[in-house]
Image: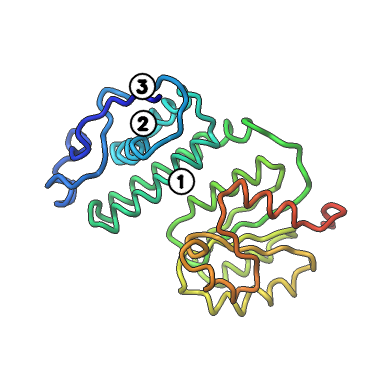
Amino acid sequence: MAQFNVENPLSLPSVPGVAHHWPEALRQGAPVGPRLVGGTSFTGKSAIDLAQIQILAQACLQGLDAARQVVFGWQRQGQSLEDIYLQGITPCARLLGQWWGADRLDFAMTTIASCHLQQLLHDFSVEFLQEAPQERNGWSLLLLTEPGAQHSMGLFMLSEFFKRAGWTVTVGVPQDVPEFKRLFQSDWFDAVGLSVSTDRHLDTLAALLPQLKDSSDNLSMQIFVGGPMALLAPDRLRCLAAEVIAEDAPVTVRRISQNMPSGGPKAS
């Protein structure tokens, strides 16, 4: 069983020179989970539980180096990076969002911690792609956020799983609808995945996606949508005339790969 060196879950991260910047809810002792104290030690592999997720979240508030040390500790425990991504980083991102929604963190702190969390994915990318590499399959994928999206960490993580499965992946974070169209039409893609976080552009996308697909050189292009809206309100996405997927990254990769037309890629 994993062993943790933690203090009272009501205590706050001790960061020299930063304590006075904590929001009032935190400085008053709102529960934000156990904090790192002199590092974290693990003995034997076990599932990454809520206590460890809280440790990662508070480490992200302390700084990028502290967050890296938590991941290194999980690796010493025997966790694969896939386990860390799905059982650690993904729920940690949700937890940071919950703390923000509960006014335990302000916007600036949430943004900084989330940026540290996303940087972990970049830092461990090479190692993750080498963890279980597959031969190139020839398929090409475009992953897009909705126009003007504020967050792309989930999309980047999904791209890593597709890359490891042998896909060639392009990730786009368009700032507006014209850029969305330009990215969609920028190259030949066998599949396009869209991450939707809000309902702001649903009507626009419902009209635009069929037009973009019809004008594509690839008449067999597969289009799927996911993201927070797929989990919270999947029925709202039916208007997009695309497959709605509310699964984790490995399941999404398998489903899309299995749905690809037989006979292999046909890019000219």
Report how far apart the C-alphas of labels 3 and 2 lie in the structure.
16 Å
Q: Seen in the image, is 105 located left or right of residue 201? A: left
Q: Which residue lies most toward the top here? A: 43
Q: Amino acid at mark 3?
A: Ser
Quadrant the N terminus occupies: top left
| SS category of the residue bearing label 2 | helix
Point 43% across, 35% down: residue: 48
Q: Position of residue 132 (x, y in %)?
A: 65, 32
Q: Nearer the viewer, residue 37 or 123?
A: 37
Q: Residues within 10 Å of mark 2 (few under 14, many from 20)?
A: few
Residue beneath disc 3? 41
Which secondary structure, mark 1?
helix
Q: Residue at x 49, y 61 (%)?
A: 231
Q: Is residue 164 above or below residue 251?
A: above
Asked whether the residues under the numbered discs 2 and 1 touch, taking CB atoms below 8 Å apart as contact, a structural biologist would say: no
Identify the mark at residue 90; answer none if there is no mark: 1
Mark 1 residue type: Thr
Name the image quarter holding residue 50: top left
Camera-nearest label, 2 or 1: 1
Of callouts 3 and 2, the N-terminal one: 3
First-in-chain label (2 vs 1): 2
Q: Which residue is mark 2?
A: 65
Q: Tell me residue 201's x, y (percent).
A: 50, 74
**Sequence-earlier tag: 3 or 1:** 3
Query: Residue 142 in the image: x percent, y percent?
Result: 65, 57
Q: Element at badge 3?
A: loop
